[in-house]
């Protein structure tokens, strides 16, 4: 049974992990008779956004604690992630990937990536194990690895930024995946497009299936 | 196209709506080519639980605002719900149903139900439109309607409590639904059993399908 590690970045599209993408990634893994463990970094969120109004709230929330809502409490600090224990690494999207796992939302191509996130990605690539990323998360792969092939959908400014890092962008529509066979990366646009929830499910299914094909 | 109203009770199994049940209910509705709108009551949660430790946190969060995380901002106050506009009403589970939508977690068969929740259920029943409930949410149907047929899985103390209200309980396992044809209620146990996420998806699919069959 192949085992996935899923990395969350909070709980909610505007300041954390996108809930549908996270949940449907877990479902796709289970449907393919694979298992998963969930990880998140133990640090405060960049900020907290009221998802009803879009306004910032005067609160502090922890990424690991909030991610535990999606994980139903079964989650570990990303610093405990060991690439040797897993067959694939998967990043759902949501602004948390660009605000908590990296500073992409504020600094684009000049952004920094959280050390434990970079270590996890580099560790899997070194072992020739696949890494999957949904929605905005592929930007982290571009920032860490540089010359990769990936998709973030069709957003021009994001495409320009990742291409400035040496990445090759492939435009995609709902449910489509892009596979970088050299680095064993799989990406799909999900809510980077104006999508319905069943289109997110199709993207997650296709991404997980493509990752399994890349597993030794 | 049939239209569902989905009522959330926060965002997270221990103090709000169960995220997988909520997300997978939305997916089931979309897969069946139906549409949905999401509602939640505008009031403070009973409490906030740290989902990593299970401990109560010294915080105040609003049910509507936190539910908006699952709804990606597209959500309305449950007081605005009009049964005439919808073909079915669906309650995902999570402790929020028993802590925020009702006081079932603390008072069992003697619990009170939030007026806008009771109004929504009675409004649909009066119009002979189906109401679906996952996980622990069926207890609300028993508390409001009394003599109904439903399932909450196989938990003896909860079964005793709903039977004391006049309800008939049917024990079920993963993915099974119970249909009360008289009151047009559909229930399924989901995480009231020790379930995997693909079993939750099966329960949501079967519940939504059974609800559609009950629609005129």
Image (cartoon, coloured by chain):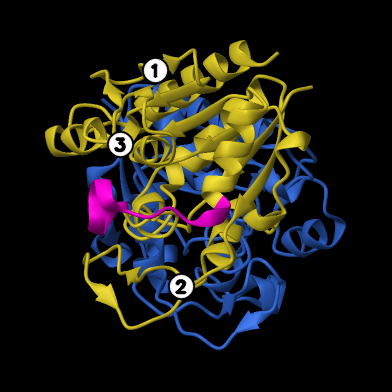
Chain colours: A yellow, B blue
- Residue at figure coordinates x 60%, y 34% from the top left: A89
Neighbour class for label 1 at 10 Å: few (<14), some, many (≥20)?
many
Residue A6, position as x, y percentages in the image: 59, 41
**Residue on which the image places disc 1:** A177
Alpha-carbon distance for marks 3 and 1?
Answer: 13 Å
Which chain is home to disc 1? A
Instruction: Compare marks 3 and 1 and give the one earlier in the sequence.
Output: 1
- Left or right, B118 with respect to B175, comes to left
| Main SS category, magenta section | helix
Q: Secondary structure at mark 3?
A: helix
**Residue on which the image places disc 3:** A191
- The N terminus of chain B: image quadrant: top left
The residue furthest bottom is: B58
A1 vs A118, nearest the viewer: A118
Tags 3 and 1 touching, CB below 8 Å? no
- The C terminus of chain B: image quadrant: top left
- Magenta segment: A104-116
Q: Is residue B108 above or below residue A155?
A: below
């Amino acid at each position: 049974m192949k085992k996935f590690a899923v990395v969350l970045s909070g709980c909610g599209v505007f300041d954390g992990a996108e809930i549908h993408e996270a949940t449907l990634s877990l479902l796709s893994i289970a449907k393919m008779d694979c298992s998963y463990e969930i990880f998140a970094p133990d640090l405060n969120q960049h900020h907290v956004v009221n998802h009803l109004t879009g306004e910032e709230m005067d609160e502090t929330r922890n990424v690991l604690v909030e991610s535990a809502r999606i994980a139903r409490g079964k989650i570990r600090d990303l610093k405990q992630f060991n690439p040797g224990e897993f067959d694939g690494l998967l990043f759902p999207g949501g602004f948390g990937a660009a605000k908590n796992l990296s500073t992409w939302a504020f600094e684009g191509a000049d952004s920094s990536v959280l050390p434990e996130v970079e270590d996890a990605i580099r560790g899997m690539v070194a072992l020739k194990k696949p890494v999957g990323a949904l929605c905005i998360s592929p930007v982290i792969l571009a920032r860490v690895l540089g010359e990769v092939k990936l998709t973030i959908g069709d957003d021009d400014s994001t495409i320009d930024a990742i291409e400035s890092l040496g990445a090759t962008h492939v435009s995609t529509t709902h449910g489509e995946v892009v596979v970088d066979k050299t680095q064993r990366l799989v990406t799909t646009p999900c809510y980077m497009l104006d999508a319905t929830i069943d289109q997110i499910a199709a993207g997650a299914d296709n991404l997980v299936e493509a990752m399994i094909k890349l597993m030794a």
